[in-house]
Structure formats: C-alpha cells, structure tokens
Amino acid sequence: MKKSEDEGRISGLMLTENSQSIQHLLFVNDSLFLCRATFKEGAEILRCLKVYGEAYGLEINFQKSSITFGKKLDPIMINTLGLYMDITQEGGAEKHLGLPECFNGSKRELLAFVTDKLKARLSGWYANTLSLGGKEVLLKSVAMVLPVYAMSCFKLTKFQCEKITSGMTSFWWNTCEEKNKIHWVSWEKMCKSKSEGGLGFRDIEQFNLALLAKQAWRLLSEPQSLLSRLYKAKYYADNDFIEPTHGSRPSYAWRSILYGRELLERGVMKSIRDGTSTRIWLDKWVMDTVPRRPMNRETRLDLRLLVSDLVTEQGLWDLMKLNELFLRVDVDRIMSYPPNMNYKDEWIWTYSKDGKYNVKSGSWLVSQPIVYQEPLPAETHHLNRLKSKIWKVDTIIQIF
C-alpha cells in the first residue's frame, strides 16, 4: 500500500496539506484501506490485497467486507464502484469495538447504547438476592467496566452520566426493579474513599475526565506517534499541545480530548534537562504543593526567556541570575534540579512515582479541591482519620 502510494497509483487521505497521508489503518480484527473513489485506485487496492493473499496463503472474504463513500459522491458511481470491487455491503452504520463507525449527529443518541447496555445488565441482577457486599462487587467490577472504553474515547453528556448514576444507585438501594426505596445516603458521599467515610465508588463524570486525560497524556508524551502527528497538523500546527487552542471546526473526539487536557494541565510540569524548550515565565517547571512557574522578583518580565538562559557554559545554574529574577525560596528549589545538557526537557506527571500519567492518580486529583478554594476544616480531618481506622478494626460476624 505504501509503495503504491509512493509510485502514485493510489492517493492516501490527508487531513490538511501538510499532514501525513494515510492509505491504511490496521486494527485488532479489522483493516481499513483508504483511496480516491475511482476505478483506477479501486483496482490498485484489489491488486494489493491479491498480492498479500498470495504471499501469505490468505483470501479476502468480500462478503464480510464493507465499503464507505464520501457524501458528495454520485449515487450511480457509488453503486458502480461497489459492483466493480464486489463489495455490496455499505459501511458506516455498524459498530467497531463497541463504538459507532461514523460519529456524527446527536451525541445523546449515538452514545445511548452505553446506558442501555448497563441498564440491561442491572435488570438481570435484580433477579438475584444479593447482599450489599455482593452489590458492591458487581457495581465496581462489572457495571463500572462496561462504559470504560466509550468513556476513554468520548466525553459522555451530562444526561448520560446522570442515567448511569441513577441506575447504579437504584440497584444499590432497591431490592427489586419496580419498587423504589429511600436513598439514605447521597451518591456523592458514597463515591468518597473508605478513609473519608464513603464506599469508594467512582463518580462517572470525574472518571470520564480521568480516562480522557489519559488520551491527552499520550498526545503530550508521544509527539511522534501517528495520532499525535495527525492531530497536530489538524488543530495545533503552530503551537504545543498543552497550550490553549481548539483549532478550526474541532471534532467531538478532539473536544473530548481537550476536556481531558483540563485535568492534565493541573498535574504536569516540565522536567528540566537542557532548558531549551522551557519558558521561564509561561511554563510550569517548579514543584511546590502543586506544579507552577517560579515567582518573579521584578514586575517587568521578558516572556522570551528560556531556562537555558539561566545555565552557564559549564552546564551549571547561574546563581547571580537566579537571585536577580526569583525569590529565595524558588532559588533553593531550582538549585535542587541540576541541568543536564545532554538531554531535552520533557513533560512529567507530578502525581506518580514514574512521572507518567495513570487513571488512578488522575481520579484522585480530580476529586481534590482546587488550591484557591478554602481548605477543609480541622474537624473534618479528625473525622476522616477516625473513619479510616474503622475499616481496619478486626470484627466477628455472628449469625443467629
């Protein structure tokens, strides 16, 4: 396929004039081939498949294959090309790995299968007489897993988050599907950790945000990947991914990733190596209780300054410049990060030991109050310590 494109026999898909062209994508159990809707390029696709099949002793089943055309193509041409390539099934309306192939239209309707699937699973569980412990296991290990793949790709609507939460709370409190009982404790309190008096359930909206931040982390930490290069060419060609930009006509998938980027921005910072890609006053590269930029001593700032401007020719910090620009507390912090001129600066996630983002730390961060909010009162901290000890008490259950 790549050779055919290089020799001009097929044309790959390009999102922009400067983006990389794509002529094929290989998935877990499917393959996607892209070309112009012409007889010449269609014949070349068939030739490539034939060569591959003869080399590996395989044969393509065109009855199970489907073909998708652009909206502007003439209906007669669509029918003729389908007959020519012996693919009669038209694609776009099916699902791949549980998600719709073509993601356009009402998001509530497209993602309704998530809530419908969960509701059907919960309805089947009502027939079993379960203890609260059994319900807890099912909700955490099964019910929360069902929408994970969809939530890691797209931002669920407010309506869908409420529907999922409503179904889980009803299953927790009710003994049968038709009769509703009083919900004695709010779901918000039940989503708190056991050390804080809750049961450790996940808040759907926060969990969705933490999963999408994982996608944002991949774009930030793997700029050479195919997905990163395509998104950069389309939406932020002249900027870094972490900079606030939406691009022109953003897709729902891109807007979902930007939603996850909001959480990622709270916990990432630049790890200083040679300092050539870190801006002193615009990037976060000092770690306090949260990652931040250093506090300035002077009121007039040169936004073009890089961290490499603070390093001497010997590869050491220029102490005179540090004392001139920053407060003493930040000078001490910066001195604890020795520069290394042999490596480039890199982004790190400050809430994990290895510096890489994970959903567990992201879920923890999204549940924490933002630093400018009022701290929790002392009584709450004492009560939380008491609640955390309750779960460690050895108890014996006697059944009469």
Image (tube, grey):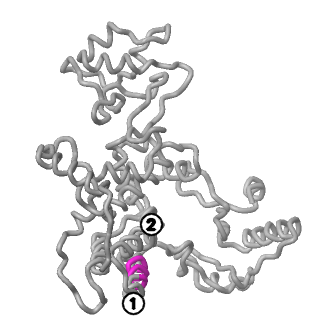
* Residue marked by disc 2: 148
Q: What stretch is highlighted in magenta?
A: 113-121
223 to the left or right of 35: left
Q: Is residue 239 visible?
A: no
Q: Is residue 241 magenta?
A: no
Going from the N terminus, do you reach mark 2 or mark 1 first?
Answer: 1
At 26% from the left edge and 51% from the top edge, which residue is drawn? 389
Q: Position of residue 185 (x, y in %)?
A: 19, 70
In the foreground, 201 or 1: 201
Amino acid at circle 1: Ala
Task: Check disc 2 and report its element: helix, strand or loop.
Answer: helix
| Residue 151, image quadrant | bottom left
Which disc, if any, is residue 127?
Answer: 1
Which disc, if any, is residue 293?
Answer: none
- Above-or-below relation of 199 to 130: above
| Residue 144, image quadrant | bottom left
Q: Are marks 2 and 1 in contact (CB under 8 Å)?
A: no
Q: Distance between the residues labelled 2 and 1?
A: 25 Å
Query: Going by the picture, which residue comes out furthest to the bottom?
Result: 178
At 39% from the left edge and 90% from the top edge, which residue is drawn? 127
At 30% from the left edge and 16% from the top edge, which residue is drawn? 331
Q: Position of residue 329 (x, y in %)?
A: 25, 19
Task: Check disc 1 and report its element: helix, strand or loop.
Answer: loop
Amino acid at circle 2: Val
In the foreground, 391 or 238: 391
Q: Residues within 10 Å of mark 1 (few under 14, many from 20)?
A: few
Q: Where is residue 245 in the image (x, y as percent from the top left)?
A: 36, 48
Q: In terms of secondary structure, what is the magenta stretch mainly? A: helix
